Image (cartoon, grey):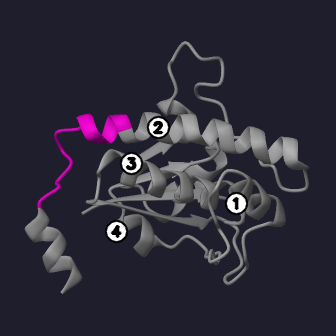
Amino acid sequence: MYRVLFVCSGNTCRSPMAETIARAGARRHGLDWLHVESAGTMAAAGCPASGGALEEAERRGFSVQRHVSRPVTREMIDAADFVVGMSVSHLLAVMDLSLDAPLALATHFLDPADERHGRDVDDPMGGGAAEYGHAWTLLEECVEGMLEQIQREPAVDADPEEAEEEIE
């Protein structure tokens, strides 16, 4: 099992959208050994996904209706093989909890020539459909790049016996 943790602020917009996109991408790529989840650096526990995230997911044929926000913890970080932040501030907050966490900014998975490479994923909270649509599209590109990198990484342990042990 290989674990990816997406982190944003409130865990109601960007990180649940990235989690949804990554789960679908993992299925599409046959990465049944990939486990994705999300959390927030300033999240209140138990909140649903934002209305804009719900609408954008549904518009694209997905659902985030079952999503429940949760604050990021050191245990989540330590269990993750990779932590993907939506902004530099999220990565810094994760580093406050664990200096050993393997980190990446979501946009680092874009082509380095792309002007968005290395920039924060803008928070659509409080915005309209256009802001949520823009965030979703950008996250699709970032997640696709991440999935391609994970597939190439020799360090990925996709040992089915290890996954079975974890389930037991």
Element carrying mark 4: helix
Q: Is residue 139 above or below residue 167?
A: above
| Disc on res. 79 | 4
Using the rendered view, name the quadrant where residue 122 is placed. Answer: top right
How busy is the neighbourhood of tag 3: few (under 14 within 10 Å), some, or many (20 plus)? few
Element carrying mark 3: helix
| Disc on res. 28 | 3
Q: Residue at x 46, y 37 (%)?
A: 144
| Disc on res. 144 | 2
Q: Are marks 2 and 3 in contact (CB under 8 Å)?
A: no
Earlier along the polypeptide chain: callout 3 or callout 4? 3
Image quadrant holding the N terminus, namely bottom left
Report the amino acid beneath label 1: Ser
In the displayed structure, does residue 22 sit left or right of residue 133? left
The location of residue 43, given as percent across then percent down, is: 69, 72
Gap in angstroms between the C-alphas marked 2 and 3:
11 Å
Gap in angstroms between the C-alphas marked 2 and 4:
22 Å
In the displayed structure, does residue 44 sit left or right of residue 100? right
Of tags 1 and 2, which is closer to the observer? Answer: 2
Question: For the magenta stretch, what is the residue range?
Answer: 148-159
Using the rendered view, name the quadrant where residue 157 is placed. Answer: bottom left
Earlier along the polypeptide chain: callout 2 or callout 3? 3
Report the amino acid beneath label 3: Arg
Earlier along the polypeptide chain: callout 1 or callout 3? 1
Q: Residue at x 70, y 60 (%)?
A: 9
Q: Is residue 69 above or below residue 123?
A: below
Of tags 2 and 4, which is closer to the observer? Answer: 2
